[in-house]
Amino acid sequence: MLRYLLGRLWQSLILLVLVSMIGFAVLNLAPGGPLSQYALTPGMTQETLDRIAEQMGLNRPLPIQYLDWLWHLLQGDWGRSYRDSQPVLGIITGHLFATLLLMGSSTVLSIAVGTWVGIKGATKRYSIFDYSATVGAMVALSIPTFWFGLVAIYVFSLELKWLPAGNMYTIGNGSISDYAIHLIMPTVVLALVNVAVWSRYMRTATLDVINQDFVRTAKAKGLSERRVLMKHVIGNALLPMITLAGLQLPTILGGALVTETVFTWPGMGRLFLDSLGYNDYPVVMGLLMFSAILVLFGSLIADLLVAFVDPRIRLS
Amino acid sequence: MSAIVSVPGSGKSHWWQSRTFRRFARHRLAMIGLIMITVLTLACVIGPYLLPFDELYIDLRARFAPPLTGYHIFGTDPLGRDLAARLFMAGRISLLVGFFAMLLSTIIGTVIGVCAGYYGGRIGAALMRFVDAFLSFPSIFLLLALAAFIKPSPFMITVIIAVTSWMEIARIVEAEVRSLRERDFVLAARMLGLSNSWIMFRELLPNAIGPIIVAATLTVARAILLEAYVSFLGYGIQPPLPSWGNMLNGAQQYLDRAPWLAIVPGVAITLAVTSFNFIGDGLRDALDARSDLN
Amino acid sequence: MSDETKHAILNPTRRRALTMMALAGASGLIMPGLLGRDRAFAATPPAKPTGQMIVGFSQEPTVFNPHLLHIEVDEGIHFSVFDPLFAIDPDGKFIPALAVEVPSVENGGISADGLSWKVKLRDDVKWHDGTPFTAEDVKFTLELMVDPDFRSWRKTGHELVRELTVVSPTEITWKMDKPFAPYPSILASTFIVPKHVLGAEKDKNTAPFNNAPIGTGPFKWVERVAGDHITLEANADYFGDGPYLERIIYKYIPDLTVLYTQFKTGDIDVAGLQWITPDHYEEAKVLEGKTVIVVPGSTVESVTFNMERPQFKDLAVRQALYHALDKATIIEALYYGLPTPTESYMPQQSFYANPDLPKHEYDPEKAKKVLDDAGWVPGEDGIRAKDGIKLSFSNSTTAGNHIREQVQQFMQQSFKDIGVEMTISNLPPAVMWGEYWTSSQFDSVVVGLDFLTGADPDTSDYFKSTSIVAKGGSGQNTWQYVNPEVDKLLTEGGQIFVPEERKKIYLKIQEIMRTDLPFLPIFQYATVRGYKKGAEGIAYNVNVRIDSWNPGSWYWSS
């Protein structure tokens, strides 16, 4: 077990280095540079920009810059933002809550709805419900998240005026109900795709269990279908669900980025776009690394949980 | 998570194909998808010739005309250009980007997958770590980081999308090839002294064609979506060249006064992506021998 | 546009003429607080700070040390927390702040040759932490600007300063290497920072001060919630008039549509930087309980050419393109009639603006004729050419600037009609304004530029032949414009301290630029600003880059 864990960690570490190299190369090999946004400032001179570039160490050879960055990262120093010279890690964790809130609420929603739709579809296989759920899921997977967001804003904010068009809370309010009302639209929009994914998996998982002997036996023993399902199906389907949750992390994170843009949600996705726009490379790099760590960690946890829940699976 | 049944051997058994074909033809959703995408493609190819408007012609007196104003069936945009004409021209771009991104990513994914699967060991492990590295980025982050610093042209966007979409196929191919590597026919080929590349691409690869086709179909859907995401965020294909994504780019700003600017291209994207997803689903079922049991 | 408010505040040509004299002549002794007050209402500010105002910005202020590289929105915070020695008011007049009076030749603050400076300081100013402000702080600030270890965003002018001497806590003197007329304008935007806080820091680039600034200004730093807002509170010990608000909150709203919505619903009191989008103006101006006005800015939108490209070396081409540019339609249709057409790079409100430049005529036929006469004849594809050079070029701007992209597409069509091919090649901001722009790698660009430093008319950075980076110079002459006469005039203008004399030179320069057309001036920006009725003291100032330049004077009427 310990060996497995160490192996996985070692693998993850190599992955992270690869990720960081790709990210760093992408950012730094491109023309322009972090200071170009200041070129239009009245009174700005190329001389000033060159001098500041030198002071910031931006004119060193790229491999040196990379190693320097990596060295600091290994010591827990994620660097400082070019914009406000705050530590990158602090900036990211500062935006983490908003993103986790959105991802969390949408994951809960999508699991709840997806599980229900999936199980119902499986138990009533080939019914109209099942068929429309299948088609619906596939259509949901095909709708661009941001477009769904735009349509939702158009209908519920601009036309019906039921819900706010953006932001996480009203300035000066910030009560729980205020957060909740701002959370509704982005949560639903982000959940859309995931409901589709969950319901498909739940349907398959349930079908697998339903066809197994012990469930048939249980039913034959006169237990109500409902109880059998609750006990066995959910119990057995839990495993793939956990794995799926781990695998879904990058998708949800990516979806959150787009959703945050549409709803001006002050989370990591918004931060990423802002930082890209301002050429704040340390923060962009930080976010790339952070999301990669999150994803790797997520899948590791998922694997460990599966092993924990199901002792039959031996990690090796 | 449908298991893929592959047939070892030459892979040129025609009965297999025809049964697959029949299964596919019976798949209602796949047929609907096929019809939708055919209609959409035809509209994009022929449409511009049928409309009395040039998709680039600016008429500032006709800005923001709502749908069904005169001959503007979908209305006009903020520069008074006909939205239908733009939609069809945009469709050409978006569909082509989707198609070529699929082609490119399939090639990348297949080559890497075959190599990793065939050689296995260190090389295979290294290649697969590389695949994992790409997979552990949320691809939209990587895509944006790339697009933000590269001059966006349809060609570059295609390449960028391909570069962030090949991993799925690489995994599928690798798994397939790895499972077949030690089979008799491969050993036989080796003993005959056939070159590695011959074995990889002539003997092993044909067995993975089925799953590759399924994955490739779904990649088209994904690529169209990705183009839309990137262009919507302003880093994709640049105007005046229309694409479905960049038509949506300015739409949020005009949501209250000209909602059709957002609705029309959005529906087109959804239709196209849904079609490919339906077809992909149909292909998967058709290639899955188990589905005959159901 | 005959907006009364606008003219009341911003048509100061005559007054500015007088005030520019303040440098050479009589200096005003006006307190900063007296100035911004709304002149139309007789409302009086409260006796003690009352209430709060929320200002919405569409960009996030992140740099609070005013001397680090920053963007305009950051200055919103700088003006609230810090003071310069003297500031510049909407009329272009310098008004004393930390200095007792604005130094001038008349009052002996500046020697007649412009080389010796003496500034007398107030003795009643305290930093937000209670430490008294002295001449040492001024010395420290001016030295910091040229400190080689500090990432100072501007050395221009400060580099010429020598022999900084603290005569007494309230007096400082220095010498200049050479007379430099724009220096007062630079000083007016040089905020004084505390020596006792920053002086001891080893690395001033990352000092805690930069994220919790301590100043002398009307408001004190409270907190920043990154990605959301910044809170400042009243400085009860402020030496000037005000502040009249208990708190001022700068709220970051990343989307202009949302910014407008929140202004409409009253979530924010003042629609700040990037303001209300032109397409909302019609709706906004009739909003209940809001004051919405159109305010000119000093930024000028132009199509700039790379003069080293063979197509653009021919003046006839530049003239023809100007004739083919339908400025009126661009302004009316795409910018909702808000900006003012212009023929010069100089804001029309400036004392130095030349009102007699030839007016632009939109006339495609004339454009064609100019090109025909110059020997540019259409080829088989309808595109003109001469001596093997095709009249075809690319045009770039920041990708994602919607209205500008619309302008480009409109221009593309207009130019096509006269046989000129313009392709659009927009780039992401990082690439666009990097070397592509600074080292003149473009064919042509649509860009909005603010050519002036404060209210000073010196544009050496933009027009001198020594300011071309692509040719080894230093500056922003990215269009690679070379004209020895302009070089000479600019050098002369930079050494004259009497506004009336300087004016002649700059009128001439504008005339030459209008003739040579290295860039086609389209319009001077005007933006839609708005605030809640009852908010008083908000005054728009074309000489600064931000609305909240005088927050100390803001208050709620009753």
Image: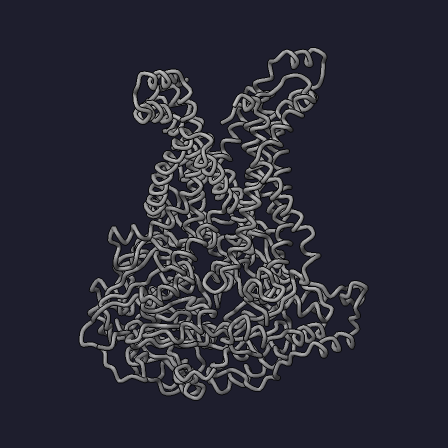
Quadrant where the C terminus of chain C sits is bottom left
Q: Is residue A25 visible?
A: yes
Query: A2 and B73: which one is in front?
Result: B73
The image quarter containing residue B219 is top right
Identified at 26% across, 59% down, the residue is A172
Image vertical order of residue C266 relative to residue A222, above or below:
below
C400 to the left or right of C109? right
Image vertical order of residue C121 relative to residue B13, above or below:
below
Colouring convention used in this rendered image of the protein: one colour
C385 to the left or right of C460? right
Image vertical order of residue A211 relative to residue C431, above or below:
above
Query: C162 and B262: which one is in front?
Result: B262
Image coords of residue C124 (percent x, y): 22, 73
Image coords of residue C25 (percent x, y): 39, 87
C212 to the left or right of C512? left
Image coords of residue C280 (percent x, y): 44, 69
> Exactly how many numbered labels are in the figure?
0
Q: Is residue A70 visible?
A: no
Image vertical order of residue C263 relative to residue C286, above or below:
above
Image coords of residue B289 (percent x, y): 57, 22
Identified at 41% across, 84% down, the residue is C4
Identified at 54% across, 55% down, the residue is B264
